[in-house]
Image (cartoon, rainbow, N blue to C red):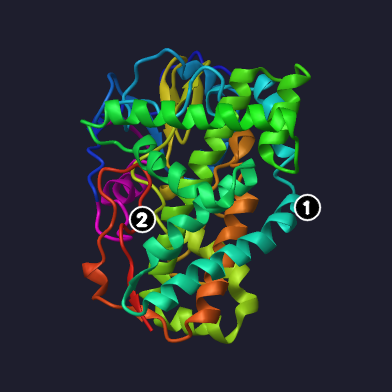
């Protein structure tokens, strides 16, 4: 629906959002402010040029992310205000930067690996891997860094196994994911080098799986490329996107979840007494944890569209704040409260609409496996330092603990 009238509300002032590092799981006060006072606001970010709309309210975010008049493909080639000096993903072929029907075609290929059956196949080796890593932590003795022993190696091992690489190869892949998602202004060269190194690994893996197909994502992508269903560049970009989201993002999200549990001992005790509650707890933790700094990939309005009382003009840049939407009090009463009995609307931690995260099933499975393994192995687990002394990541797009010292 197009609008030929004047804007539905007075022109919005432009707010600069520096997206500073925040302590632990502290919500971003800028997001809280605009959600309360101006849920569709104009902003500038630390890099790029121009300004953009920021949408924060739950229903507005769902609307923008599912309405075809807001295009991801429209961002390609445009210099816009942004979070990082270098784009995280390839804008030439990745799922992140395309719209239906091409997006539907590529997503259909990747979805062949992200099935309930595929996750059932992945869970036993994931459980064995988690316990093997906790064996090492137990042998080292307390205090220990749970990020070093579990939350860093485990997601990389699992996503490498899912892609088709050897689980023990995770150390050679892990370092690059940090650079790929850095917003360090001096990290451009490191980001490019990390992307090139990761691409080379992915290209080699796809070549091997074309000759020796197995039950993994690389085999699915290699087969689709060999048949002409997708291009070789598309296969590489898709594999890289899964690697980045399945490794680095799960590392930080799961570490933040464990920090949340360790700083809510009553909730931790409840899960120890009732392990069947873990899946529901994981969903609430995904809502509760501020999993990223700032915002992700924007969209471009292809025509005039009214959102939340504001008229967004054709060509305008629009960002959606999933983290803010997960704290919308009109949808989640007492959003600051961690509540494992919470019912009602689902969180938006995995996005919404056509670009809903394909790896959501795997991320949920990994979180459940890690929490169950830790609770089962270390019933007296607790922080080895004061909660405020736990060091969190800096200059990153994804938030999470850098170290998580624990004792038992």
Mark 2 and mark 1 in contact? Answer it, CB < 8 Å: no
How far across and how far down the image is residue 167, in percent?
57, 51
Q: Residue at x 32, y 56 (%)?
A: 27
Label 1: element kind? helix
79 displayed left or right of 223: left
Q: Quadrant of the N terminus?
A: top right
Above-or-below relation of 264 to 29: below
Q: Residues within 10 Å of mark 1 (few under 14, many from 20)?
A: few
- In which image quadrant can residue 341 be found? bottom right
The magenta region covers: 22-45
Q: Residue tagged by mark 2?
A: 400
* Label located before the other in sequence (2 or 1): 1
Q: Residue at x 70, y 20 (%)?
A: 230
100 displayed left or right of 171: right
In reply to whether residue 37 is colored magenta, the answer given is yes
229 displayed left or right of 406: right
Comparing 326 with 235, the one in front is 235
Q: Residue at x 62, y 41 (%)?
A: 163
How far across and how far down the image is residue 176, in percent?
39, 38
Above-or-below relation of 83 to 144: above
Comparing 231 with 263, the one in front is 231
Q: Residue tagged by mark 1?
A: 117
340 displayed left or right of 320: right
Mark 2 and mark 1: span between their CA atoms? 30 Å
Q: Residue at x 64, y 42 (%)?
A: 164
* Number of residue marks: 2
In reply to whether residue 38 is colored magenta, the answer given is yes
- In which image quadrant can residue 145 be found? bottom left
Residue 314 visible in image? yes
């Amino acid at each position: 629906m197009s609008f030929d009238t004047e804007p539905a509300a007075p022109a919005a002032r432009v707010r600069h959002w520096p997206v500073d590092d925040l302590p632990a799981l502290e919500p971003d006060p800028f997001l809280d402010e605009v959600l309360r006072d101006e849920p569709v606001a104009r902003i500038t970010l630390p890099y790029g040029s121009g300004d953009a709309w920021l949408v924060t309210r739950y229903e507005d975010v769902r609307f923008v992310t599912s309405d075809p008049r807001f295009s991801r493909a429209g961002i390609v080639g445009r210099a816009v205000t942004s979070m990082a000096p270098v784009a995280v993903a390839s804008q030439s072929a990745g799922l992140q930067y395309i719209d239906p029907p091409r997006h539907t075609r590529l997503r259909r290929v990747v979805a062949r690996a992200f099935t309930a059956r595929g996750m059932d196949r992945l869970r036993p080796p994931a459980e064995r891997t988690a316990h093997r890593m906790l064996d090492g932590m137990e042998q080292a003795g307390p205090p220990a860094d749970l990020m070093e022993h579990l939350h860093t190696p485990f997601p990389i091992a699992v996503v490498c196994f899912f892609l088709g690489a050897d689980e023990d190869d995770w150390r050679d892949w892990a370092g690059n994911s940090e650079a790929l998602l850095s917003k360090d202004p001096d990290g451009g060269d490191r980001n490019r080098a990390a992307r090139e190194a990761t691409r080379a690994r992915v290209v080699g893996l796809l070549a091997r799986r074309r000759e020796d197909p197995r039950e993994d994502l690389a085999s699915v992508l290699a087969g689709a490329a060999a048949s002409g269903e997708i291009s070789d560049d598309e296969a590489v970009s898709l594999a890289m996107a899964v690697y980045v989201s399945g490794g680095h993002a799960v590392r930080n999200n799961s570490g933040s979840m464990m920090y949340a549990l360790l700083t809510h001992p009553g909730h931790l005790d409840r899960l120890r007494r009732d392990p069947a509650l873990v899946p529901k707890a994981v969903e609430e933790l995904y809502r509760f944890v501020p999993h990223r700094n700032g915002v992700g990939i924007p969209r471009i309005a292809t025509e005039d569209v009214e959102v939340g009382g504001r008229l967004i003009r054709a060509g305008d840049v629009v960002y959606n704040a999933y983290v803010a939407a997960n704290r919308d009090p009109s949808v989640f009463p007492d959003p600051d409260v961690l509540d494992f009995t919470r019912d009602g609307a689902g969180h938006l931690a995995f996005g919404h609409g056509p670009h809903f995260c394909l790896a959501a099933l795997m991320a949920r499975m990994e979180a459940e496996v890690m929490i169950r393994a830790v609770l089962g192995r270390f019933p007296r687990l607790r922080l080895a330092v004061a909660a405020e002394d736990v060091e969190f990541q800096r200059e990153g797009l994804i938030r999470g603990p850098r170290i998580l010292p624990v004792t038992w």
